[in-house]
Image (tube, grey):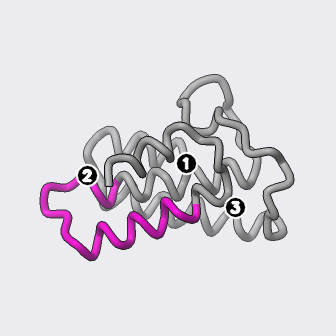
């Protein structure tokens, strides 16, 4: 997810989305389906402090970054907005306490 965030900040939204797709797949293949038991801390979207992420935190961050990258281009349309909203809903279910995810939801 760090690569995806870097690409997003550089404005390479297409590659950021691809990096998020890869991260989501890797996190999904690397662990059993998460049921939210790990508490869902807020540090995954704060961009500071942690070098490694737990599976659900990393996955929720990947969904959040992918949503942001889908909404960022000026050419973003209704299809991208729907896809971003879907990503945000998944991220929010995984990590309901995330301030960053809630902030993006408020933008809709």
- Discs 3/2, front: 2
CA–CA distance in space, label 3 to label 2: 24 Å
Q: Quadrant of residue 84?
A: bottom left
CA–CA distance in space, label 1 to label 3: 10 Å
Q: Main secondary structure of the magenta part?
A: helix
Which secondary structure lies at badge 2?
loop
Q: Along the horizontal axis of the image, is 59 left or right of 66?
A: right
State yes or no: discs 2 and 1 in contact (Cβ < 8 Å).
no
Mark 3 or mark 2: name the one nearer the start of the chain.
3
The residue closer to the viewer here, 18 or 38, is: 38
Task: Locate residue 44, reporting x and y percent.
Answer: 62, 38
Residue in view at x 30 percent, y 55 percent = 13
Q: Which residues make up the magenta segment?
A: 69-90
Q: Find disc 3 in the rendering and name its residue.
A: 27
State yes or no: discs 1 and 3 in contact (Cβ < 8 Å).
no
User: Which of the labelled discs sits on residue 72, or is there none?
Assistant: 2
The residue closer to the viewer here, 66 or 89, is: 89
Residue in view at x 64 percent, y 42 percent = 97
Task: Locate residue 58, reporting x and y percent.
Answer: 65, 50
Which secondary structure lies at badge 3?
helix
The furthest residue to the top = 49
Which secondary structure lies at badge 1?
loop
71 in magenta: yes
User: Which of the labelled discs sits on residue 1, or is there none?
Assistant: 1
Mark 1 or mark 3: name the one nearer the start of the chain.
1
């Amino acid at each position: 997810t760090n690569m995806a965030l870097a690409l997003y900040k550089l404005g390479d939204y297409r590659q950021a989305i691809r990096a998020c797709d890869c991260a989501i797949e890797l996190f999904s293949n690397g662990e059993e389906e998460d049921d939210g038991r790990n508490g869902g801390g807020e540090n995954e979207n704060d961009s500071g402090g942690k070098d490694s992420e737990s599976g659900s935190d990393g996955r929720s961050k990947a969904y959040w970054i992918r949503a942001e990258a889908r909404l960022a281009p000026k050419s973003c349309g209704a299809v991208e907005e729907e896809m971003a909203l879907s990503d945000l809903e998944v991220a929010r279910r995984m990590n309901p306490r995330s301030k960053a995810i809630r902030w993006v939801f408020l933008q809709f």
